[in-house]
Image (cartoon, rainbow, N blue to C red):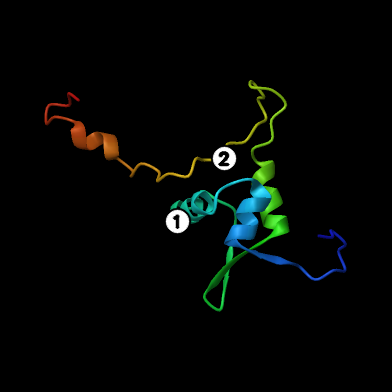
C-alpha cells in the first residue's frame, strides 16, 4: 500500500480495516455502531474505510507515557451512557 499522493485512494472493507488496526472485525463493527471508531464511508451499501482515516483514528491513541498530558482518548467499543442516565436513580428528595 503506497502513500504516494498521486495514487488513487484505497478503500478497505471492514475485515481489511480491522486487520490493519489489529482489531477483530466484530470490534470494528461495534465501534462503527457506537460512533466511537474511525470515519467510514458507505458506498453502494458497502462499508469502507480509507487508510488516511484509519491512521488518523489510530494516532488519537498515541502516547509517550502513561501520564502523557497531551494524549487524546480513544473510546472503547461500547455504548456511551445516555445523558442523564445517573439521574434516574435519584429520589424525589434529591438523594441517590
Quadrant including the C terminus:
top left
Quadrant including the N terminus:
bottom right
Q: Position of residue 79 (x, y in %)?
A: 40, 46
- Front residue of 67/43: it is 43
Q: Is residue 68 shown above or below 32?
A: above
- In what element is the residue under mark 1? helix
The numbered mark at residue 73 is none
Q: Position of residue 68 (x, y in %)?
A: 67, 24
Q: Position of residue 17 (x, y in %)?
A: 64, 56
Q: Is residue 39 shown above or below 68?
A: below
Left or right: 96 as drawn, with respect to 56: left
| Res. 78 image quadrant | top left
The numbered mark at residue 33 is 1
Q: Residues within 10 Å of mark 1 (few under 14, many from 20)?
A: few
Q: CA distance from mark 2 to mark 1?
A: 15 Å
How many dots with numbers?
A: 2
Residue at the spot 64% in from the left edge and 59% down from the top edge? 16
Residue at the spot 28% in from the left edge and 39% down from the top edge? 85
Q: Is residue 59 shown above or below 44?
A: above
Q: Residues within 10 Å of mark 2 (few under 14, many from 20)?
A: some
Left or right: 43 as drawn, with respect to 94: right
- Front residue of 35/3: it is 3
Left or right: 9 as drawn, with respect to 70: right
Residue at the spot 65% in from the left edge and 25% down from the top edge? 69
**Residue reaching furthest top?**
67
Mark 2 and mark 1 in contact? Answer it, CB < 8 Å. no
Left or right: 3 as drawn, with respect to 48: right
- In what element is the residue under mark 2? loop
**Residue reaching furthest bottom?**
44
To which residue does mark 2 refer? 74
Query: Going from the N terminus, do you reach mark 2 or mark 1 first?
Result: 1
Q: Position of residue 5 (x, y in %)?
A: 86, 64
Amino acid at each position: 500500500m503506497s502513500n504516494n499522493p498521486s495514487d488513487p485512494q484505497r478503500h478497505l472493507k471492514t475485515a481489511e480495516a480491522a486487520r490493519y488496526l489489529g482489531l477483530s472485525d466484530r470490534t470494528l463493527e461495534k465501534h462503527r455502531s457506537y460512533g466511537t471508531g474511525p470515519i467510514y464511508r458507505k458506498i453502494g451499501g458497502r462499508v469502507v474505510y480509507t487508510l488516511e482515516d484509519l491512521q488518523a483514528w489510530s494516532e488519537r491513541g498515541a502516547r509517550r507515557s502513561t501520564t502523557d498530558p497531551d494524549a487524546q482518548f480513544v473510546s472503547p467499543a461500547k455504548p456511551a451512557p445516555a445523558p442523564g442516565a445517573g439521574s434516574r436513580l435519584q429520589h424525589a428528595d434529591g438523594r441517590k
